């Protein structure tokens, strides 16, 4: 049987500008001419988006992080195709979309959630949030990423795997890390605990 021809691209939703001037990034999946769209759960200013290349124009740290996120999403499409094929389910744009939406409900990662929270925090910078605090949150995300890679040999951890042992492990990691006291004193750890939803 001939394998389906897949294509993954990213576009912005023009005409629906958010209050901060940014627009939503859409995740477009095409299989043998059939097309489906999902929201990539990320936003960007239209002037910062390269429509032809389907990615940010600049080379800032935030743009690099966004590019990594989009590459991860692209790989998820091919993983979904392999899983559908393994289960004997026809590989179509609709079936891939359904699989990704269902899978995302149970496999969202803590780093993905943290990055999304930071993104929303940055949108409020200058309104009711300070740049200094936003930068500390970015530092917290960076240390959490390093902790997960070091202790769990993984790029992320699913939300349903987070427990008090994980929280304590991260706390101990911070205590042994350079400049850890600055991070702890800035309440980043306490904020992380509260945002995790754990009692």
Image (cartoon, rainbow, N blue to C red):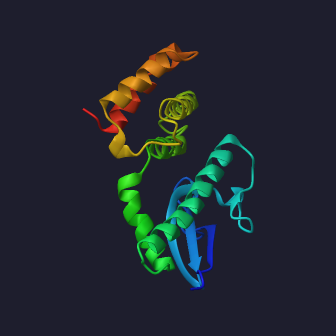
Residue 178's spot in the image, x, y percent?
58, 15
Depth check: give the residue in front, 179 or 185. Answer: 179
Q: Residue at x 62, y 56 (%)?
A: 71
Answer left or right for 67 relative to 182. Answer: right
Q: Is residue 127 above or below residue 70?
A: above
Depth check: give the residue in front, 94 or 58. Answer: 94
Residue 117's spot in the image, x, y percent?
46, 43
Is residue 90 among what the camera can see? Answer: yes
Q: How many marks?
A: 0
Is residue 44 among what the camera can see? Answer: no
Answer left or right for 54 relative to 38. Answer: right
Q: Is residue 112 above or below residue 77?
A: above
Q: Is residue 175 above or below residue 19?
A: above
Depth check: give the residue in front, 131 or 101. Answer: 101
Residue 147's spot in the image, x, y percent?
51, 29
| Residue 135 position by quadrant | top right
Q: Is residue 112 above or below residue 43?
A: above
Residue 93's spot in the image, x, y percent?
51, 78
Depth check: give the residue in front, 133 or 72. Answer: 72
| Residue 73 position by quadrant | bottom right
Q: Residue at x 42, y 77 (%)?
A: 88
């Amino acid at each position: 049987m001939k394998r389906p021809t897949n294509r993954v691209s990213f576009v912005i939703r023009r005409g629906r500008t958010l209050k901060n001037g940014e627009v939503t990034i859409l995740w477009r999946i095409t299989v043998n001419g059939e097309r489906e769209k999902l929201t990539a759960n990320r936003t960007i200013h239209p002037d910062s988006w390269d429509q032809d290349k389907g990615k940010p124009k600049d080379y800032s740290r935030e743009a690099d992080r966004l590019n990594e996120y989009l590459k991860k999403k692209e790989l998820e499409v091919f993983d979904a195709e392999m899983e559908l094929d393994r289960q004997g389910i026809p590989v179509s744009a609709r079936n891939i979309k359904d699989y990704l939406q269902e899978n995302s409900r149970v496999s969202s990662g803590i780093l993905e959630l943290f990055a999304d929270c930071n993104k929303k925090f940055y949108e409020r910078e200058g309104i009711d949030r300070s740049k200094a605090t936003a930068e500390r949150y970015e530092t917290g995300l960076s240390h959490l990423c390093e902790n997960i890679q070091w202790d769990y040999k993984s790029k992320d951890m699913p939300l349903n795997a987070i427990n008090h042992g994980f929280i304590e492990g991260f706390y101990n990691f911070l205590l042994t890390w350079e400049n850890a006291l600055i991070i702890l004193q800035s309440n980043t750890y306490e904020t992380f605990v509260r945002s995790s939803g754990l009692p």
